[in-house]
Image (tube, rainbow, N blue to C red):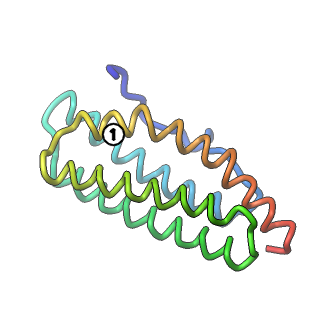
Amino acid sequence: MTDYPNPLLPPEQIPQVSLESMNRTHREEVELVNRLAATVAAGITGDADSAEIASLLDDWLEHTRNHFARENELMAQYNFPAFPVHSGEHERVLTLLEDLRRTWIESKALRPLALFLFEEWPAWFDNHVHTMDNVTASFIRQQGG
């Protein structure tokens, strides 16, 4: 973890799904995560701006809560068969983000945050969008959404 890509996820590399509303939400999330990643990388190579990191973590967590709530509402509205699995993954990731934020607030330890941002989140996001979100968007689109 010595190379910190900037941006972490280039906007043109965001996987696309068949619902533009979901694509727009994913772009917003990637913008937030890219800002947080740049701030964390600067903190690792110099002085960490703990207040800025806390603020960006709060923004990311709030955006993710709203993002997942909208997807969950769509899945419920269209009776998506895999709703329990997809929403369960949302809950798992929200818990992870809440724990990550709590760890930051309590310890200001950059390593756990950096590990998640630079190693775990990009792979999770890519996989989640390519699999769960892609199937969900296709189903909703076929149902007239």
> Looking at the image, which residue is at 72% across and 60% down?
136
Check disc 1 and give the amino acid type.
Ala
List the residue tagged with mark 1. Answer: 38
Is 25 displayed left or right of 92 in the figure?
A: right
Q: Position of residue 93 (x, y in %)?
A: 45, 53
Q: Residue furthest top?
A: 2
**How many numbered marks appear?**
1
Name the quarter where the C terminus is drawn: bottom right
Question: Where, by quadrant of the figure, is residue 117 drawn?
Answer: top left
Element under label 1?
A: helix
Question: Where, by quadrant of the figure, is residue 62 drawn?
Answer: bottom left
Residue closest to the eye, 9 or 88: 88
Residue closest to the eye, 131 or 126: 131
Crowding at dot 1, Cα within 10 Å, few <14 / some 14-19 / many 20+, comes out as some
Is 73 displayed left or right of 106 in the figure?
A: right
> Looking at the image, which residue is at 42% across and 33% down?
6
Q: Position of residue 58 (x, y in %)?
A: 30, 61
Residue closest to the eye, 129 or 19: 129
> Looking at the image, which residue is at 62% across and 39% down?
13
Name the quarter where the N terminus is drawn: top left
Question: Where, by quadrant of the figure, is residue 5 drawn?
Answer: top left
Residue 99 vs 111, above or below: the answer is below
Is 65 displayed left or right of 136 in the figure?
A: left
> Looking at the image, which residue is at 21% across and 37% down?
110
Residue closest to the eye, 87 or 13: 87
Q: Position of residue 120 (x, y in %)?
A: 44, 36
Q: Position of residue 113 (x, y in %)?
A: 29, 41
